[in-house]
């Protein structure tokens, strides 16, 4: 190994400085058999390290994640906002001659000849009202107010919500806020703008929740063509959501049927998802029309922008973000309803809107059970009140809903990276240490070796240069005296060893 030590610094580094396993065996003392064994073992170790490192990096950049689920117990839990809607959008008795002339054809109440499309679905009184309209003197109004029409003809809170009880006490008038949705007039309980004003549950169970008694007024149901399949149903549509999120009752929520008491046992869940590149959740918490981003808010915004783009107006229930006017009856049912249906079904190719779930979600999973109402007993409860219901009327029109927490805890669901950067480095370091003896400081030793090797080669080249220069000077010194140079002298000069001087 004398020649290697003279020409390279690696043998010195391998036997005297490095912590890497294998190199001392390759460059140290020993025969060729031993060195060959060490070369083979070292090569196999490095192949394993490289293979495992490639697998680790591949797994790291596939961005797998794991889900951590925990349950936290609280003394108090904030109650969600509760939005309730009647399946029926317009009350038959609230429709006037003026309304029928302006919206009757568009809603599918009367045909082009101004006759009822389905007389069997209406009461005799309503049929007589339509027949008595003087279509000559009553003409369509180009400035007809659709917002007023929807609010005025929809079910009113005092008629729809017969009773509201919060923690065994009557609700206040301010506990409900009017909200327009695709189902017309809806009412939201606990829609507080400040978290400190939200209703709080301090105990689990039905007596510490909300009980609502509804009168759906089935006799007032008006068959129209803007409700889709909901026109065949009678009951209450209910949605649980955060107070800061808009309700999307037509597509989401659950149903309470008439003649039944529906018990809704809720839970509270906080779900945290990893952003890109792990999942495609929406990290931003702002949206164009709403203060806080939500999945239903995004869907409402998509629908609104599409209607505004193709119809130059917006529906009554859509936000006023861009200042478009409310659609006229003709725009509503000729353009807006068609565009709304296309967005919902995803067939509007030019304006495909992608709504992703937010990375931070508060959800209210629930389970429901139902009990049949006792109409005779309820008839006695309402006897002597403004709602003097009969037993038959109760079975056809009254629905009761109780909403409560089944436990004062909330489920925390959190996504975590399966392999973080720290874990990746630890696994790589473990493989390097196990198979090669390398550590974090070994990298510094490699840099040190590169520096020492460069310095070694530079000094060696300088010594060789000086050696050749000295030989030339000696040759020039003897030529003027014409002293013959012998081959032995030249050989002794070329064999001059400077390695010890370098070291």
Image (cartoon, helix red, strand yellow):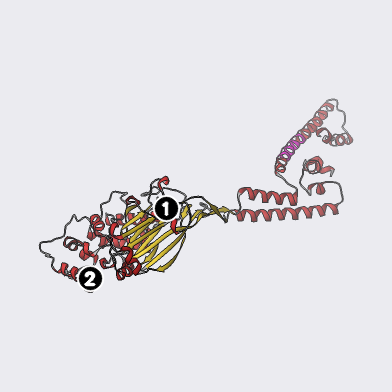
Q: Earlier in the sequence, mark 1 or mark 2?
A: 2
Dot 1 and dot 2 residues touching (CB under 8 Å):
no
Residue drawn at x 31%, y 70% is 391
Task: Return the residue at label 1.
Answer: 242
* Magenta stretch in the rendered image: 447-460
Left or right, residue 30 beside residue 450: right
Task: Return the residue at label 2.
Answer: 122
| Residue 148 in sight in this render | yes
Residue drawn at x 44%, y 59% is 206
Residue 82 position within the rendered picture, expressed as x and y whole percent measured from the top left:
39, 56
Residue 363's label in the rendered image is: none
Residue drawn at x 74%, y 54% is 45
Residue 117 position within the rendered picture, expressed as x and y whole percent measured from the top left:
21, 71
Q: Is residue 112 magenta?
A: no
Query: 438 or 74, which lies in front?
Result: 74
| Residue 8 in sight in this render | no
């Amino acid at each position: 190994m004398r020649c290697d030590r003279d020409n390279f610094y690696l043998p010195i580094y391998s036997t005297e400085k490095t912590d890497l396993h294998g190199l001392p065996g390759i460059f140290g003392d020993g025969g060729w058999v031993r060195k060959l064994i060490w070369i083979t073992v070292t090569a196999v170790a490095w192949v394993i390290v490289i293979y495992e490192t490639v697998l680790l990096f591949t797994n790291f950049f596939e961005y797998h994640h794991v889900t951590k689920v925990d349950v936290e117990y609280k003394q108090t839990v904030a109650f969600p906002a509760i939005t309730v809607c009647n399946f029926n959008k317009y009350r038959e008795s609230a429709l006037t001659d003026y309304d029928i002339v302006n919206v009757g054809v568009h809603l599918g109440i009367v045909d082009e000849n101004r006759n009822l499309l389905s007389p069997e679905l209406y009461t005799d009184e309503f049929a007589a009202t339509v027949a008595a309209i003087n279509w000559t003197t009553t003409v369509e109004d180009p400035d007809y107010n659709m917002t007023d029409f929807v609010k005025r003809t929809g079910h009113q809170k005092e008629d729809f919500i017969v009773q509201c009880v919060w923690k065994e006490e009557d609700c206040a008038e301010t506990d409900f806020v009017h909200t327009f949705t695709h189902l017309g007039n809806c009412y939201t309980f606990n829609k507080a703008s400040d978290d400190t004003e939200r209703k709080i549950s301090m105990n689990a169970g039905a007596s510490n929740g909300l009980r609502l008694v509804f009168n759906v007024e089935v006799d007032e149901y008006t068959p129209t063509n803007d409700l889709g399949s909901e026109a065949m149903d009678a009951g209450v549509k209910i949605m649980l959501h955060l107070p800061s999120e808009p309700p999307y009752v037509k597509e989401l929520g659950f149903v309470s049927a008439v003649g039944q008491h529906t018990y809704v046992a809720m839970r509270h869940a906080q779900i945290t998802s990893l952003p890109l590149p792990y999942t495609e959740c929406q990290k931003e918490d702002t949206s164009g029309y709403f203060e806080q981003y939500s999945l239903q808010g995004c869907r409402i915004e998509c629908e609104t922008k599409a209607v505004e783009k193709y119809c130059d107006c917006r529906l009554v229930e859509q936000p006023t973000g861009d200042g478009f006017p409310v659609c006229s009856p003709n725009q509503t049912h000729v353009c807006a309803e068609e565009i709304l249906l296309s967005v919902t079904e995803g067939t509007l190719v030019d304006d495909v809107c992608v709504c992703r779930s937010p990375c931070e979600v508060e959800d209210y999973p629930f389970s429901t059970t139902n009990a049949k109402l006792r109409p005779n007993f309820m008839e006695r409860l309402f006897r002597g009140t403004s709602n003097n219901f009969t037993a038959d009327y109760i079975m056809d029109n009254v629905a009761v809903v109780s909403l409560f927490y089944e436990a004062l805890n909330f489920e925390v669901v959190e996504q975590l990276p399966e392999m973080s950067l720290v874990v990746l480095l630890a696994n790589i370091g473990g493989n390097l240490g196990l198979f090669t003896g390398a550590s974090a400081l070994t990298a510094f030793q490699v840099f040190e070796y590169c520096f020492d090797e460069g310095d070694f080669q530079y000094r060696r080249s300088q010594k060789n240069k000086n050696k050749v220069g000295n030989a030339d000077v000696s040759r020039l010194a003897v030529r003027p005296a014409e002293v013959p140079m012998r081959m032995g002298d030249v050989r002794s000069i070329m064999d001059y060893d400077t390695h010890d001087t370098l070291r």
